[in-house]
Amino acid sequence: MLQESLTPIALLDSIKPKQKNRPQRFSRARRVVAASPAVAAALCCLACWMALRADAQSAVATATESVPAMSAGTAPSLVRWSGSLPEAAGQMVQVRFALYEDQAGGLALWNETQTVKVGADGRYSVLLGATSAEGLPQALFQAGEARWIEATPVADSGGETAGARPRSLLAAVPYAFKAVDSETLAGREASDYVTREELQSAVAAAVPATAQPNPETNSTLTGSGTKGYVPLWTGDTLLGDSVIAESGSRVGIGTATPAAKLDVNGASTLRGTVSLPATVATAKAGVNSPSLELGASVFSSTASAAVAKNFAWRAVSAGNNTGSPTANLELLFGSGSAPPTSTGLSIAPNGQITFAAGQTFPGGGGGSITDIVAGTDLTGGGDTGKVTLKLDTTKVPQLGTANVFTAAQTIDANLILPATTSAN
């Protein structure tokens, strides 16, 4: 590729003598004689440069014959590329130019075919993107990834290429296309976005006039409030206290001094399920649910003070890390500041109740069964566990063989009455 530097014309202009305002009349011979050696050297360089420039312009003109017309003010997305085709020196050939993501393999991200004039030295120069009015797509370089170019001569008029050629890595210049994107927002023109004034106008048009603040009536807010309370609009421009107060990380409804995360002073209506879930158990331990506590307060004459009596229901895990894990609903109790503990009363998932030790059941006679004692002609009894009662065979004789009693109570076998032993 030809590289441009300071031209000999500029050099010549810098060293030629300044002319007076009035025209100078010199003969051609005098001008040649008056020229300094430096001027002669500059003229020699100028002649050489013009010859090279003419050859370069010819090659560039050939490469850019297909450049589409660009509209005024539009920066063409074109990239100058120079290559060599020694086998086609001095010829006009068709070359397919393609951009790839990788140095080898993969599908082309972009391609075009141009008619290229190859110089006598086998070199050529083209403008990539010249066959399209938009030039090279900017999206090819916005990701900041490497792009490899492959220039392959077309073997015939059918568009078949003569075989893949080694690819070359594009220099950093094409990635300047990213700078074009910086003039937009994510590739969109500034006119595609709404200005602050347009947004305010659109909101004002969408919101009913009655809902918009009136600067004549709503210019000043009035009212009073209490520190720690959530404010409440008591009028269009008047603020007051609500029933909700905050104290640290606690919220109180109906109280300014909440005792818990949420403290409601007054009756509550819950129109949905109230959940007290437990955290997730592990193989090492099960997890119980939070407690639903019910508190009472009684006055103690001994302590001369009120004493809290707290009951609680809690779901307690059982059989953790076994083949049949389960849970029971358990009743707890605590007095004073002691935390509630199990009373021994629990309900299993099937509804069976386990009673606390010492449980008594009032009956119709006004008491509880505490013991079973065998009476006349009976043996056995007890006050715990399984109680068994039997006939006392010493008092109620048993029949020797099987007998069937009918309605008339007829005995179908001999009745043997053993005699008593007489004394000698």
Image: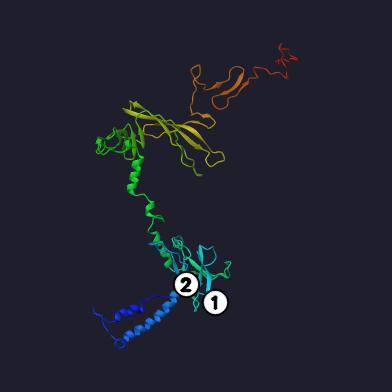
Q: Residues within 10 Å of mark 1 (few under 14, many from 20)?
A: few
In the drawing, does residue 183 fall left or right of residue 373? left
Question: At which x and y percent is residue 384?
Answer: 54, 26
Looking at the image, which residue is at 31% across and 79% down? 13
Q: Which quadrant of the view contains residue 215?
A: top left
Which colouring convention does the figure follow?
rainbow
Question: Dot 2 lies on which element?
Answer: helix
**Figure quadrant of the C terminus:** top right
Q: Quadrant of residue 1?
A: bottom left
**Could you tell me how far apart the alpha carbons at marks 1 and 2 are, in whole angstroms?**
19 Å
Q: Is residue 183 above or below residue 148?
A: above
Q: What residue lies at 47% left-to-right and 71% top-to-bottom?
A: 63
Nearer to the camera, 174 or 264: 174
Q: Which mark is residue 87?
A: 1
Position above or below: 144 against 390: below
- Mark 1: which amino acid? Glu
Counting residues from the start of the chain, the first of labels 1 and 2 encountered is: 2
Q: Which residue is mark 2?
A: 62
